[in-house]
Amino acid sequence: MTEIVVIPHHEICPEGAVIEAEQGETVCEALLRNDIDIEHACEMSCACTTCHIIVREGFESLAEADELEEDYLDKAWGLEPESRLSCQAQVSDTNLVVEIPRYTINHASERH
């Protein structure tokens, strides 16, 4: 199992968290499975930016983003070089430290 450290987020994960993820699952799937309610308005189909994360450690272990993901990332609030859509970032055998940005460009929360 791979460890994902989630940096505290004022609403979604105020205390931060350390969770385990299976290789091959996406960061979004791992967060949701561990009751970290990250927004994912498009149901993880790479059609929005609500699951945007910043990978603070372990970024190089993720497969490169494809062109569609890059196009959506260009629209994300607070974009950084280590930004990914958590629905597309598949976990490998390297531990990750992720930050969920404070805001999204979603005008209405879908809270699943």
Image (cartoon, rainbow, N blue to C red):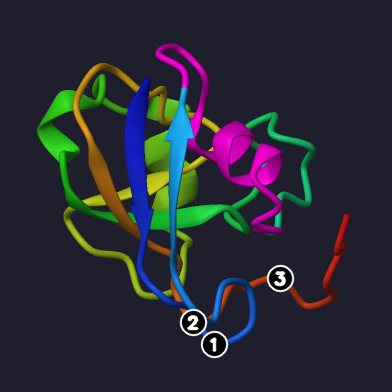
Instruction: Name the residue type under label 1.
Output: His
Residue in the picture at 45% in, 66% down: 100
Q: Which residues are magenta?
A: 22-38
Which structural element holds mark 1? loop
Binning the other alpha carbons within 10 Å of mark 1 as few (below 14), some (14 to 19) or many (20 upward) gives: few
Query: CA separation, marks 3 and 2?
Result: 12 Å
Q: Which residue is mark 2?
A: 102
Left/right placement of residue 5 relative to residue 61 reads: right
Q: x, y percentage for residue 4? A: 36, 43
Q: Which residue is mark 1?
A: 10
Are the two marked residues, 1 and 2, in contact with CB atoms closer than 8 angstroms?
Answer: yes
Of labels 3 and 2, the one closer to you: 2
Q: x, y percentage for residue 91? A: 37, 24
Check the picture and name the quadrant holding the C terminus. bottom right
Instruction: Name the residue type under label 2.
Output: Arg
The part of the image, by quadrant, that contains residue 33 is top right
Which structural element holds mark 2? loop
Q: x, y percentage for residue 50? A: 63, 58
Q: Earlier in the sequence, mark 3 or mark 1?
A: 1
Q: Nearer the viewer, residue 4 or 51?
A: 4
Q: x, y percentage for residue 11? A: 63, 83
Q: Which residue is mark 3?
A: 106
The part of the image, by quadrant, that contains residue 103 is bottom right
Binning the other alpha carbons within 10 Å of mark 2 as few (below 14), some (14 to 19) or many (20 upward) gives: few
Disc number placed over residue 60 in the picture, else none = none
Image position of 94 with respect to 107: above or below = above
Residue in the picture at 64% in, 45% down: 34
Q: Earlier in the sequence, mark 1 or mark 2?
A: 1
Check the picture and name the quadrant holding the N terminus. top left
Binning the other alpha carbons within 10 Å of mark 3 as few (below 14), some (14 to 19) or many (20 upward) gives: some
